[in-house]
Image (cartoon, helix red, strand yellow):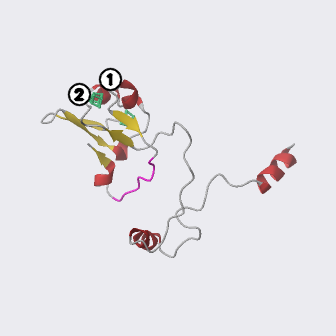
Amino acid sequence: MILKVLMAQLFSRPVTNRFPAKYMPRSVTGFLAKVGQGKAKLVPPVPVPKGFRGKLAYDRETCIGCQLCIRVCPASVIMFKPETKKIRIHVARCTFCGQCVDVCPVDALAMTEEFLLAAYDRFDPSLIVE
Ligand code: SF4
Ligand code: SF4
């Protein structure tokens, strides 16, 4: 039985892929810079499964400022901005639990398929949603 499983795994395709490049570049940051300049192409990551919980998307026009999302967030990721009655989400601390999405009465929050969220600074603009 174990031998059968082993053999099946030996000849099955891996569920992961070589990301971001087929062969490890000498410098990953150099490679990514080249991608930014259009001189190299990323090997795309594997598709995410249905229902994947990635970076939050926020529709600030729809938001009514009820703050329910702030109350349910277990990681204290969401801040209220009293001057505009809107919210700011610090994605670097998000645990992607989805509770804020579930509780929002006007569907102003959604989880996207975006998961490439690495940054040197947790306050990087790419990690702030508002
Ligand atoms: S997904 Fe969870 S951790 Fe992230 S902001 Fe929403 S409630 Fe907070
Ligand atoms: S729960 Fe929805 S409507 Fe209420 S503050 Fe959060 S995003 Fe805005």
Q: Residue furthest left?
A: 83
**Image quarter of residue 69:** top left
- Residue in the picture at 53% in, 59% down: 44
Query: What x and y, as percent, mark residue 51?
Result: 52, 36
Q: What span is in magenta?
A: 114-120
Rendered image quadrant of residue 120? bottom left
Quadrant of the displayed image that contains ligand 1: top left
Give residue 67's mark. none
Confirm or deny contact between disc 2 and disc 1 (CB under 8 A).
Answer: yes
- Residue beneath disc 1: 105
The answer to whether the residue bearing label 2 lies less than 8 angstroms from the nearest atom of ligand 2 is: yes
Q: Position of residue 34 (x, y in %)?
A: 42, 73
Kindly identify the amino acid type of the residue bearing the numbered disc 1: Pro
Q: Residue at x 14, y 33 (%)?
A: 82
Q: Is residue 116 magenta?
A: yes
Q: Is residue 79 left or right of residue 119?
A: left
Mark 2: amino acid: Ile
Label 1 residue near ligand 2, CB within 8 Å? yes
Please tell me whether residue 24 is drawn above or below residue 113 in the rendered image: below
Q: Is residue 45 left or right of residue 122?
A: right
Q: CA distance from mark 2 to mark 1?
A: 9 Å
Q: Main secondary structure of the magenta part?
A: loop
Residue denoted by label 2: 64
Q: Residue at x 40, y 71 (%)?
A: 33
Q: Image quadrant for the C terminus? A: top left
* Number of residue marks: 2
